[in-house]
Image (cartoon, rainbow, N blue to C red):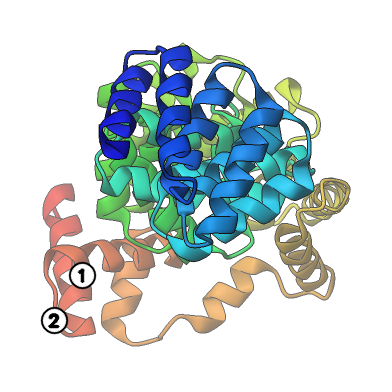
Amino acid sequence: MTQEWFDRATECIRAGDYVGAIAALTTAIDNNPSFALAFDRRGRAYFEAGRLHDAISDYTRALELDKTLRSAWYGRALVRLALKNFPGALADVDRALELDESHAATYQLRGTICRKLADRQGAIESFKRAAQLYLEAKDKENCQRCLDRLRELQPPPTPQPEATPSLAPIPSVGDYYKTLLDRVQKGDTREVLKDLNWALQADKNDDRAYCCRGILYVKLGKTQQALQDFNRALQLNPNDAFAYRNRGKTRFQLGDRAGAMADFDRALALDPNDALVYVARGNSFRDAGDYPRALEEYGRAIELDADAAPAYLNRAMAYTRLEETRKAIEDYQTAASKFCEQEDWDNYHDTLKKLNQLQGGVSEAASKKAEIPQDHLRQRLLMLVGGQWEIAERLIAQAKLFYPNRSEDWYIEKIVYDIERERGF
């Protein structure tokens, strides 16, 4: 008889008839005062009916009868949250998790309670675990809710300018992705990659996640995977200037100068005031030996953003190659000051190193030249690339991608042959 009343109450709850459920469960409890699950279920009905203190009383009685009843710990935590008893709610939800560590909704509730207690880190950990469990259960809707909470919880990112070779935060995405890129710059690549893979599991059409992961792959030296992610990001959002800029930089790194310039042009068509695109274009012209065009691009970047430290840094590198030492020193000093103000310590120290080398009479070009092997084959290659060994190194790296497991001399001879054939020698 007791079970019949309990089953009837269950159907009433499903139908939203909480008054009927309370009546049926009261009858069941009268028939069996030790029926813990009936107290638990009536606590839920009381909660849904807005009778919060009656709900607390029933959940407490259920737990007195059976301390292993996870649903009662969870239910009382929910009521205590509604009553703003946040410490009590946290204690209850933690007991529920001791009984079942795989219950996504309990972690989600814990995240909400931690937010109320201003425990941001606890909230992040709880929502993240909840999202993972929802993802495993293929509950995309609740997974997305947890992801949204996570994005809200991310602190504002530390501003980081773009420079070679460091990465800059995305200006056009949510704080969650900006924070991830901030972590990449600090070297936390493994955990960030896990977070991005997880985000893409939750939403395979998240262009921002693809773009961020592409930047991370560049950082890890996985340029082909980076290009695949940038391509996917642009398929999903063809008007993302940031993705074009970063794909262009990656293509330039691989020696695809024409493709890189096409991407930079597209980025500027979408966002003509992006100073960092002009820096990237300047680097392309500089490494091709077109220093007047490079200086023009750096100057344009500085006109758009006087605090664009990468523009000063890269212009200083161009002046160094042109042996305009005074101008190079001035730009290095300006870049170092701005990197310091922006707390971009990696680029700050790198710039100071370049400045000290230059002031000590050891320019970047001289340092590069000292490292160049002096045999005849390498000298031919050096002559063909206008004395710029960094271009030769990039061509060798590109050849290694297409023709792996060959000797160094084989790559150099192949490059020399290709250049001379193209030029009609």
Q: Secondary structure at mark 1?
A: helix
Q: Reply above or below: 251 against 239.
A: below
User: Is 237 above or below relative to 231?
Assistant: above
Q: Quadrant of residue 278?
A: top right
Residue denoted by label 2: 406
Q: Identify the residue at horizontal 35%, vertical 36% (top origin).
A: 260
Q: Is residue 147 left or right of residue 398?
A: right
Q: Position of residue 245 (x, y in %)?
A: 45, 32
Question: Distance from label 2 to label 1 (Cα)?
Answer: 8 Å
Q: Secondary structure at mark 2?
A: loop
Q: Mark 2 or 1 closer to N-term?
A: 1
Residue ID at (69%, 55%): 91
Say few, some or many: other residues with alpha carbon within 10 Å of mark 2 (under 14 / 14 to 19 / 20 or more). Answer: few
> Looking at the picture, does residue 146 appear above or below residue 165?
above
Q: What is the count of numbered marks? A: 2
Percent position of residue 286, x then y: 52, 45
Q: Residue at x 68, y 41 (%)?
A: 113
Q: Residue at x 86, y 53 (%)?
A: 340
**Image vertical order of residue 215 relative to residue 267, above or below:** below
Q: Are marks 2 and 1 in contact (CB under 8 Å)?
A: yes
- Residue 222 vs residue 300: left or right? left
Which of the image's four quarters has the C terminus?
bottom left
Q: Amino acid at mark 1?
A: Lys
Q: Please name whichever residue, 59 or 386, is drawn nearer the observer in this view of the structure.
A: 59
Q: Which mark is residue 336?
A: none
Q: Is residue 168 left or right of residue 265?
A: right
Question: Which residue position holds label 1?
Answer: 400
Q: Amino acid at mark 2?
A: Arg
Q: Position of residue 151 (x, y in %)?
A: 57, 35
